C-alpha cells in the first residue's frame, strides 16, 4: 500500500520537475518516487571494476621494477651538476 506524502517545491523547481516528468512520459508523482528510490538504492556501478587495476598502466613503463636505478641516476646527476 502506498503512503501519501505532501512536499513543497519552489515554483522554479516545480516547473522544471513537471517538465522533466513530461519528457519522460510519467507523472510528477512517479518522477519523485523514482528519484527517492534511486537515492535510497545508492550509487549504481557503471563499467568494469577490474579496469581500476590498470589505471596507472602506461603500457610498457618499467618504473615499478627499475625505480631504484632511476632514483640513483637522478641523485648522481644532481651530484655531478654541483
Image: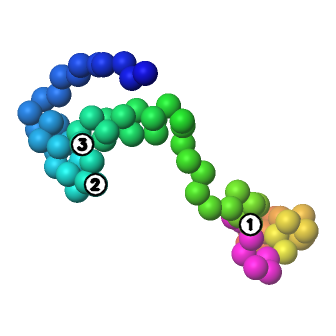
Location of residue 12 with respect to 61 vertically, above or below: above
Q: Secondary structure at mark 2?
A: helix
**Residue 46: image location, x then y, percent:** 58, 57
What residue does disc 3 label? 27
Residue 76 visible to the viewer: no
Judging depth in this view, the residue of 24 and 78 nearest the camera is 24
Q: Residue at x 30, y 19 (%)?
A: 4
The reply to whether discs 1 and 3 touch (Cβ–Cβ < 8 Å) is no
The tag earlier along the polypeptide, 1 or 2, is 2
Residue 17 coordinates in the image, percent (x, y): 21, 42
Dot 1 corresponds to which residue? 54
Give the residue at x 12% y 41%. Answer: 15
Main secondary structure found in the magenta portion: loop
| In-image side of 3 versus 74 (left or right) | left
Q: Residue at x 90, y 64 (%)?
A: 68
Few, some or many C-alpha atoms within 10 Å of disc 2 (few <14, some 14-19, many ≥20)? few
Q: Tell whether position 59 is magenta.
A: yes
Mark 3–mark 2 CB contact (< 8 Å): no
Magenta extent: 55-61
Q: Secondary structure at mark 1?
A: helix
**Residue 55 pos. (x, y %):** 69, 64
In this view of the protein, which residue sits in the foreground, 76 or 3?
3
Q: First in sequence: mark 1 or mark 3?
A: 3
Name the mark on residue 24.
2
- Rounded to the nearest angstrom, the CA distance separating label 1 from label 3 is 43 Å
Q: Is residue 55 left or right of residue 8?
A: right
Q: CA distance from mark 3 to mark 2?
A: 9 Å
- Residue 51 quadrant: bottom right
Q: Camera-side residue: 34 or 65?
A: 34
Q: Where 60 falls versus 78 (above or below)?
A: below
Which residue is situated farthest in the left direction here? 11
Amino acid at each position: 500500500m502506498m503512503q501519501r506524502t505532501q512536499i513543497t517545491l519552489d515554483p522554479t523547481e516545480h516547473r522544471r520537475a513537471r517538465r522533466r516528468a513530461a519528457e519522460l512520459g510519467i507523472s510528477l508523482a512517479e518522477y519523485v518516487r523514482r528519484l527517492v528510490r534511486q537515492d535510497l538504492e545508492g550509487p549504481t556501478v557503471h563499467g568494469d571494476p577490474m579496469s581500476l587495476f590498470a589505471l596507472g598502466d602506461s603500457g610498457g613503463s618499467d618504473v615499478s621494477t627499475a625505480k631504484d636505478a632511476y632514483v640513483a641516476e637522478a641523485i648522481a646527476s644532481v651530484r655531478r651538476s654541483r
